[in-house]
Image (tube, helix red, strand yellow):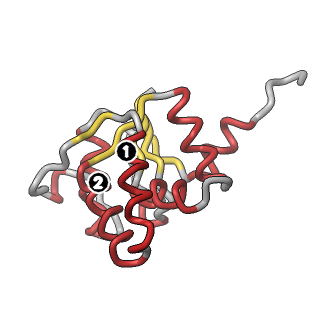
């Protein structure tokens, strides 16, 4: 399964390695194909430079150690071609997830709630965590 991960998942996984989001991220790395967009990588670098400048080296190493498919986010996006989303700044993420042929978009951003598309399925870390921790019947 191809899983596209939003910027907030990357940041949360790195800053809170024992948290639920990191557990979900590690599950994806071990069991699925991880897709990251150039937009999300750039956004993570901007956030770290601004909010956590003393930890930028950790983010750089994180990306170097990670096995993922890089999707090049389009330079311009025609909003009319894609489903409506509350925050227009999130279009690069939505468009990248769709165009990369991802099966799942994992995001902690509430602006993606209610976006109606067939593919990718949109999951929050909590929803994904529930799926991977459900016990089989009879266990």
Q: Quadrant of the C terminus?
A: top right
Q: Quadrant of residue 99?
A: top left
* Residue located beneath label 1 in the image: 117
Of label 1 and label 2, which has the lower sequence position? 2
Q: How many marks?
A: 2
Instruction: In the rendered structure, find residue 83 and report the number of the disc placed on it.
Output: 2
Q: Is residue 138 left or right of residue 41?
A: right
Closer to the camera in the image, 81 or 62: 62
Residue 44 position, x and y percent, is 35, 62
The answer to whether residue 122 of the structure is visible from this angle is yes
Q: Quadrant of residue 48?
A: bottom left
Q: Is residue 92 left or right of residue 77?
A: right
Q: Quadrant of the N terminus?
A: top left
Circles 1 and 2 in contact, beta carbons < 8 Å: yes
- Relative height, residue 47 to residue 139 (above, below): below
Residue at 61% across, 54% down: 17
Helix, strand, or loop for circle 1? Answer: loop
- Relative height, residue 16 to residue 27 (above, below): below
Residue at 67% across, 53% down: 18
Residue at 29% across, 60% down: 84
Q: Is residue 73 left or right of residue 15?
A: left
């Amino acid at each position: 399964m191809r899983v596209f991960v939003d910027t907030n998942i990357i940041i949360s996984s790195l800053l809170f390695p024992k948290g639920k989001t990191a557990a979900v991220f590690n599950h994806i790395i071990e069991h699925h194909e991880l897709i990251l967009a150039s937009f999300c990588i750039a956004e993570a670098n901007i956030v770290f430079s601004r909010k956590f400048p003393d930890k930028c080296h950790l983010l750089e190493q994180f990306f170097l150690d990670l096995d993922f498919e890089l999707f090049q986010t389009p330079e311009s996006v025609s909003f009319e071609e894609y489903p409506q989303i509350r925050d227009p700044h999130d279009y690069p993420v939505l468009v990248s997830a769709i165009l990369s042929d991802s099966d799942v978009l994992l995001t902690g951003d509430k602006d993606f709630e209610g976006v109606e598309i067939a593919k990718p399925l949109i999951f929050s870390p909590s929803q994904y965590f529930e799926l991977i921790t459900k016990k089989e019947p009879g266990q």
